[in-house]
Every structure is written in structure tokens, then in C-alpha cells.
Image (spheres, grey):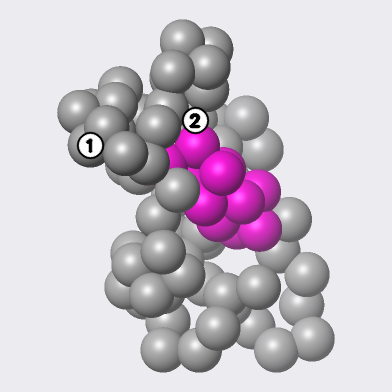
């Protein structure tokens, strides 16, 4: 990820290939927080889900995915942030 963070460039599409996969980010976050991967896809009103928020943040910052794509990935039809 260090190399990707330095070398990513919107004008060079090939640099996107260096980005970690969304599934890898989800796996690492779920392992770090010691929660099931399925818990990262659950959003409950009035309940703060820090692991889910961290996963969404990392996908947005590391992969530069659009919010529309993140909504699809995290199974929600609402805004994610």
C-alpha cells in the first residue's frame, strides 16, 4: 500500500491495479477488530459500527472508489458517510 499511495495518479489508469482489493481491506479490518466480515455490511440506525466505518474509509481513501460503488459493495442504497 505504501507504493500505491505514492504512485497513484488519476491520469494513469494502470496505477489503480496496485490498489488493494476491497475484499482484502474488509478481511483485514474484520481480523483487526475481531468481528465477522458479515458485520461490516450491517448498518443499524442509532448504532455506531466503527469497523464498518473504518472499512468504508479505507476503501474510499486507498482505492478511490466512488460513493456509488461503495454503496453497492456494502449493500446499502443510502449514503455511506
State the image coordinates of residue 62 (x, y, percent, origin top left).
Answer: 50, 37
Q: Position of residue 38 (x, y in %)?
A: 42, 59
Q: Of all residues shown, which one is farthest toward the front?
A: 11
Identity of the residue drawn at 52% across and 52% down: 60
In the image, 41: left or right of 46?
left
Q: Is residue 30 left or right of residue 25?
A: right
Q: Is residue 45 visible?
A: yes
Residue ID at (65%, 73%): 81
State which quadrant residue 49 falls in: bottom right
Q: Where does the magenta region start and end?
A: 52-63
Mark 1 sits on what residue?
Answer: 13
The mark nearer the N terminus, 2 or 1, is: 1
Image: 13 above or below 47? above
Type of secondary structure dominating the magenta stretch = helix
Q: Quadrant of residue 75?
A: bottom left
Residue under circle 2?
Answer: 28
Q: Position of residue 58 (x, y in %)?
A: 57, 43
Q: Nearer the viewer, residue 27 or 22?
A: 22
Q: Position of residue 11 (x, y in %)?
A: 32, 39
Nearer mark to the viewer, of 2 and 1: 1
Residue lying farthest top?
3
Query: Foreground residue, 26 or 4?
Result: 4
Q: Residues within 10 Å of mark 2 (few under 14, many from 20)?
A: few
Residue 24 visible in the displayed image: no
Q: Is residue 41 left or right of residue 21?
A: right
* Residue 75 is inside the magenta segment: no
Classify mark 1: residues with Cα within 10 Å, few (<14), some (14-19) or many (20+).
Answer: few
Please report the residue visible at 73 percent of the width from the left and 56 percent of the height from the top.
Answer: 50
The disc at residue 41 is: none
Amino acid at each position: 500500500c505504501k507504493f500505491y499511495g505514492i504512485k497513484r495518479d488519476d491520469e494513469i489508469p494502470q496505477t489503480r491495479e496496485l490498489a488493494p482489493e476491497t475484499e482484502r481491506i474488509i478481511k483485514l479490518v474484520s481480523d483487526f477488530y475481531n468481528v465477522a466480515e458479515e458485520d461490516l455490511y450491517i448498518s443499524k440506525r442509532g448504532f455506531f459500527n466503527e469497523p464498518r466505518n473504518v472499512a468504508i474509509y479505507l476503501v474510499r481513501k486507498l482505492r478511490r472508489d466512488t460513493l456509488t460503488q461503495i454503496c453497492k459493495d456494502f449493500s446499502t442504497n443510502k449514503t455511506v458517510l
